Image (tube, grey):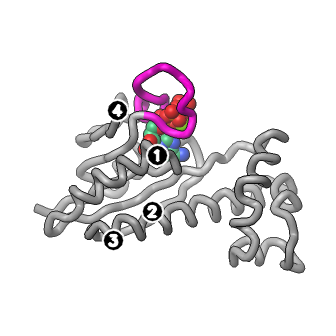
Amino acid sequence: MKKRILVAIDGSTHAAKALDFAADMAKAPGSELVMLHVVSDRRLSDDERRLAETEYGAALRGDPALDKLIQGGGDLLVTTMLGRSRESELTARRAIGKRLLDETAATARKAGAKVADLLVPAGDPAAEIVAAADRLGIDHIVMGARGLGGFGSLVLGSVSQAVIHQVKCPCTIVK
Ligand code: ATP
Ligand code: MG
């Protein structure tokens, strides 16, 4: 039976587990994976900006989307553009998200799954996951129990909890 499986990726080890599970499901004939990473559309705080610089500065240098944005190219720091405008922050976040999904898709393909689409919308993660599932006629959502937040003692993070409450299709939470 044809099945479209949506897997929600935030870069956490929980989401990596969810991906393994989803890729295994998507190996069935006629099944395909849609991968989604939601980027935040908030402005970065000073702390977040510093973190982004340390975490992603090296990775982002040389990215075509950012090279276009940063006139002059070369070894410019991501900070130059993070914080320059809301639009440039979003471009940086999308580039980071797209790179994350490219890596994730490679893992899924290696596991034998067909990857149909990579989506990097901006907004509230749970709302975007639910909206994408409705819009794309998704048959099954797979996500991790926790994510990058990961410090609380709750079994479920706020995103997986909100998705379970709102979504109409079957949803697997991988622990
Ligand atoms: P919280 O965010 O409430 O502090 P948390 O980070 O531990 O808690 P969640 O954010 O709910 O937990 O993450 C649970 C799962 O939701 C992740 O494993 C991932 O599958 C999905 N998820 C979370 N954030 C995103 C995102 N920005 N884009 C796509 N999927 C996400
Ligand atoms: Mg989270």
* CA distance for labels 3 and 2: 10 Å
Q: Please state the horizontal and vertical placement of residue 54, each as a whole percent of the image.
A: 77, 53
Mark 3–mark 4 CB contact (< 8 Å): no
Q: Please state the horizontal and vertical placement of residue 144, each as a whole percent of the image.
A: 39, 40
Label 3 vs 2, first from the N-terminus: 2
In the picture, measured across the screen, residue 100 lies left or right of residue 8, that is right
Label 4 vs 1, first from the N-terminus: 1
**Residue drawn at x 74%, y 51% as measured from the top left:** 52
- Which label number is shown at residue 110? 3
- Which label number is shown at residue 13? 1
Tell me, yes or no, whether the highlighted magenta stretch contains residue 155: yes
Q: Which of marks 3 and 4 is in front?
A: 3
Mark 4 surroundings within 10 Å by alpha-carbon count, few (fewer than 14), some (14 through 19), many (20 or more) = some
Q: Please name the amino acid that badge 1 sits on.
A: Thr
- The residue range painted magenta reads 146-162
Q: Nearer the viewer, mark 4 or mark 1?
A: 1
Eyeballing the image, is 163 above or below 31? Answer: above
The residue at which mark 2 appears reads as 104
Label 2 vs 4, first from the N-terminus: 2
- Which picture quadrant has residue 20? bottom left
* CA distance for labels 4 and 1: 20 Å
Task: Label 3, secondary structure: give it.
Answer: helix
* Most common secondary structure along the magenta stretch: loop
Residue in front for this viewpoint, 104 or 90 = 104
Task: Label 2, secondary structure: give it.
Answer: helix
The residue at which mark 4 appears reads as 164
Q: Is residue 89 visible?
A: yes
Q: Nearer the viewer, mark 1 or mark 2?
A: 1
Mark 4–mark 1 CB contact (< 8 Å): no
